[in-house]
Image (spheres, grey):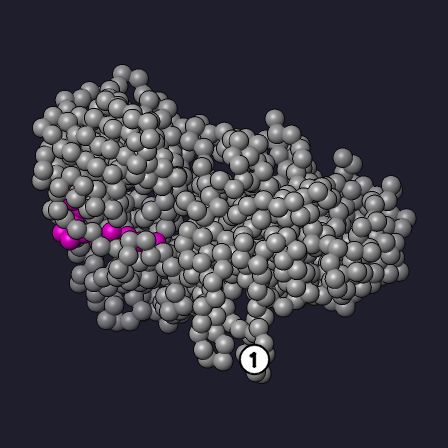
């Protein structure tokens, strides 16, 4: 592995690929690292799916351009910002061969998000087998594993709906529940998840709708209600995050540290995938327009 | 089931911290010793779901067996921690008085009790506390420092006790429950759900919350254990918390505390709820609210801090109010070690030592001439070596997972792997890496995915198979593990 670059990109998901397609690497020595074995981010395992035509169009044909150094199964586990202006930042990268240090004058953090869990939302109840988030479902189906036979998908995003549809296509009996918001009335299929039931496997969930509590039987709960920024590896780095753990950036995608940029879900966990694509394009223009 | 008759010297029933500590001690004697555990893995009851604190015993009832064991354990821990390489940190504990009334309780009740237990308390003013622990609520009155209190990884300790015992010739049988016991004058016959008939010169009942039911299998109803539920909240971000923060205890429990976790993060809890069922491990909205309310009085930032996980554990409350370590009423060859309340981890080295002596005296044993005292540190060795990251949230590598799967007592469940390595404990709660871990279980140990349980029987995440999408080619890991 070469160890010195003009730009290091952390993550090879939608926003990073969007930035690369928009020419962010132009005229620079660029390296990309990703935890997964293939580019495309976590969303890729759910594609193709209705509502994600733009993402699929971008991802399915994309190959790493030959002028870019790309390492997969290579996880950035730490970031040490430069000690003086103009010096390189240090990335700690874990690969099969061990931990290596890589130096880059500019860093683009595009490592996305993790799916929020039932535990993150502090939903009480038992802790049985059968409570998952969509990323597990998509990886299971790709291996030929069924996560259950009767599933409740809790979430109303495009991604939650795509997950529910895939499960149904695989022969799982699926009910999709739309999380109720505190304001406004309830519509069909809308309810608030208040408790997980059953042990050792899920036996159902307790829901609340218009003040009424009722139970719905299922052997699987797919909790698909949001993302959290993937910033745990930045602890101690000095990069400023907001209250919800996302990286704080200005309108030019800059973090509080000179030369370190961030785009995509890692700066806004509620971001739509289309906004991630747009943000990647914007940072490419900003980085190419600057003195980098 | 195949009939399997086995003649051994000592059988230990129960693979929690107490049973494995006893197994560890007995394996240093010249005896054949076997431990049976009904769950698929060790440390699956009270030992896994608790505050993970090694208490000094400063507030134990003076002159109780519990106080004696805790005092003796203080002497034994340093050697055990070093030999078994147990993750441990002597953080010290701040016992906080939130009011003048609580300060009076400390001065007039807790301090004298602590002196009788041989533990020195260091009085601190409000200003001194806030200087060393600025995260503590500024509205407190004062408190004391208990310097000797520390934090530990309970699962590591349990596994390490058992693994060292295995290195010294002991045997661990998992997934077999005791279904019948007959106590005779010179031996005890024990039948298990796996079809094994043990004839042991002595049997130690260390079945935790179920020890009273094990006793009843032998016709001994001399004590009763009831479950007390404790709910906990785990916070990943430590917000600067570096010491155990204790409230002034009530008559029922030590109260809701804040403690750093030895492998990172902070633990909040527990509640103390009398429950009906010994398998009621559900968290409740009410319980979690009460924890937040309780910790807010001590460390305000923890009232709101984002949580990665919540869980509940059950501890055994004994009908006698103290540890029950004595022969059964139906015969001296069955020894009960029960009612260990919430201090089992803290007292475990001393309980092991004490029970070892009781068994030695009953059977006339001598120590082995050669004993393996230490445990190879395979997890840290693996971490230093090669392997890409498998668990993204906690940066756990392939080498660490492989080391656990190849260890002398390998995990049999996904939760067992989680407790051995820390994988699946982070923000995503294993949703990202669990499929890879299932792949590795399959490749290393030949486990069919649909037989791999999360924890108990019938909890397997893989519920069945489908050809949908599988033909599209798996993006799963294909790399060879050497």
Q: Residue at x 29, y 66 (%)?
A: B97
Helix, strand or loop at label 1? It is loop
Residue B240 is left or right of residue A262, and the answer is left
**Residue B316 falls inside the magenta stretch:** yes
Kindly tell me whether residue A258 is visible in this rendering.
no
- The quadrant holding residue A93 is top right
Residue B43 is left or right of residue B439, and the answer is left
Residue extending farthest top: B369
Residue A182 is left or right of residue B6, and the answer is right
In the rendered image, residue A253, in percent from the top left (x then y), is placed at 76, 63
* The N terminus of chain B lies in quadrant: top left
- The quadrant holding residue B202 is top left
Residue A155 is left or right of residue B351, and the answer is right
- The quadrant holding residue B477 is top right
| In the foreground, B248 or A120 | A120
Q: Residue at x 58, y 76 (%)?
A: A188
* The C terminus of chain B lies in quadrant: top right
Q: From the viewer's perspective, is residue B331 above or below residue B430?
A: above
In the rendered image, residue A59, in percent from the top left (x then y), is placed at 79, 52
Q: Residue at x 49, y 80 (%)?
A: A210
In the rendered image, residue B293, in percent from the top left (x then y), is placed at 38, 70
Which residues, given as a range, are shown in magenta?
Answer: B313-325
**Residue B103 falls inside the magenta stretch:** no
Q: Which residue is mark 1?
A: A186
Q: From the viewer's perspective, is residue A33 above or below residue B443?
A: below
Q: Residue at x 45, y 36 (%)?
A: B411
In the rendered image, residue B374, in percent from the top left (x then y), is placed at 38, 27
């Amino acid at each position: 592995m070469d160890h010195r670059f003009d730009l290091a990109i952390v993550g090879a998901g939608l926003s990073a690929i969007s930035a690369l397609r928009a020419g962010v690497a132009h005229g620079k020595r660029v390296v990309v690292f990703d935890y997964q074995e293939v580019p495309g981010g976590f969303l890729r395992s759910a594609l193709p799916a209705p509502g994600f035509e733009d993402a699929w169009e971008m991802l399915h044909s994309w190959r790493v351009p030959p002028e870019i150094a790309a390492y997969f199964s290579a996880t950035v586990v730490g970031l040490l910002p430069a000690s003086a202006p103009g010096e390189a930042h240090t990335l700690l990268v874990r690969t099969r061969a061990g931990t290596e240090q890589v130096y880059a004058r500019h860093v683009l953090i595009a490592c996305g998000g993790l799916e929020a869990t039932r535990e993150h939302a502090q939903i009480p109840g038992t802790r049985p087998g059968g409570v998952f988030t969509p990323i597990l479902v998509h990886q299971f189906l790709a291996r030929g594993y069924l996560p259950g036979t009767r599933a409740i998908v809790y979430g109303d995003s495009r991604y939650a709906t795509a997950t529910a549809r895939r499960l149904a296509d695989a022969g799982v009996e699926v009910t999709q529940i739309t999380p109720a918001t505190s304001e406004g009335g309830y519509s069909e299929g809308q309810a608030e998840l208040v408790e997980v039931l059953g042990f050792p496997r899920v036996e159902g969930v307790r829901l609340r709708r218009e003040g009424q509590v009722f139970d719905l039987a299922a052997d699987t709960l797919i909790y698909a209600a949001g993302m959290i920024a993937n910033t745990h590896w930045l602890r101690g780095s000095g990069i400023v995050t907001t209250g919800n753990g996302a990286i704080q950036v200005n309108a030019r995608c800059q973090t509080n540290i000179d030369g370190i940029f961030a785009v995509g879900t890692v700066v806004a966990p509620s971001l739509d995938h289309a906004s991630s694509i747009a943000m990647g394009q914007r940072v490419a223009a900003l980085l190419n327009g600057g003195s980098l | 089931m195949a009939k399997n008759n086995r003649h051994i010297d000592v059988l230990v029933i129960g693979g929690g911290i107490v049973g494995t500590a006893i197994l560890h001690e007995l394996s240093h004697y010249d005896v054949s010793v076997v431990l049976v555990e009904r769950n698929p893995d060790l440390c699956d009851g009270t030992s896994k779901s608790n505050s993970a604190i090694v208490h000094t015993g400063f507030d134990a009832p003076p002159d109780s067996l519990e106080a004696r064991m805790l005092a003796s354990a203080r002497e034994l821990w340093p050697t055990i921690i070093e030999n078994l390489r147990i993750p441990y940190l002597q953080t010290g504990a701040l016992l906080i008085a939130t009011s003048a009334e609580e300060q009076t309780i400390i001065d007039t009740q807790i301090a004298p009790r602590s002196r009788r237990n041989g533990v020195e308390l260091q009085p601190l003013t409000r200003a001194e506390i806030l200087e060393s622990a600025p995260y503590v609520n500024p509205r407190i009155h004062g408190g004391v420092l208990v310097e000797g209190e520390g934090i530990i990884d309970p699962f590591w300790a349990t596994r390490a006790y058992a693994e060292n015992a295995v290195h010294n010739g002991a045997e661990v049988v998992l997934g077999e429950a005791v279904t019948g016991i007959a106590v005779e004058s010179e031996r005890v016959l024990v039948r298990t759900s796996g079809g094994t008939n043990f004839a042991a010169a002595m049997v130690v009942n260390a079945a935790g919350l179920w020890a009273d039911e094990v006793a009843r299998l032998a016709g001994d109803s001399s004590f009763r254990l009831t479950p007390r539920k404790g709910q906990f909240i785990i916070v990943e971000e430590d917000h600067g918390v570096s010491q155990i923060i204790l409230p002034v205890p009530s008559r029922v429990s030590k109260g809701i505390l804040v403690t750093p976790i030895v492998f990172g993060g902070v633990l909040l809890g527990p509640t103390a709820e009398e429950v009906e069922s010994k398998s009621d491990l559900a968290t409740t909205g009410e319980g979690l609210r009460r924890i937040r309310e309780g910790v807010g009085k001590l460390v305000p930032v923890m009232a709101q801090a984002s949580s990665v996980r919540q869980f509940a554990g059950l501890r055994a409350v004994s009908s006698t109010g103290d540890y029950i370590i004595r022969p059964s009423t139906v015969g001296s060859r069955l020894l009960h070690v029960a009612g260990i309340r919430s201090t089992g981890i803290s007292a475990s080295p001393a309980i092991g030592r004490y029970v070892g002596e009781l068994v030695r005296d009953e059977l006339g044993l001598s120590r082995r001439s050669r004993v393996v005292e230490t445990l190879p540190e395979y997890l840290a060795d693996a971490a230093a070596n090669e392997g890409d990251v498998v668990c993204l949230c906690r940066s756990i590598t392939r080498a660490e997972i492989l080391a656990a799967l190849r260890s002398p007592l390998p995990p049999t469940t996904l939760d067992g792997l989680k407790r051995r390595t820390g994988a699946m404990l982070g923000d995503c709660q294993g949703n990202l890496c669990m499929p890879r871990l299932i792949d590795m279980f399959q490749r290393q140990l030949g486990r069919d995915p649909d037989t791999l349980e999360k924890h108990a029987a019938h909890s397997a995440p893989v519920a069945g198979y489908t050809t949908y999408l599988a033909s599209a080619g798996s993006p799963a890991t294909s790399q060879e593990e050497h």
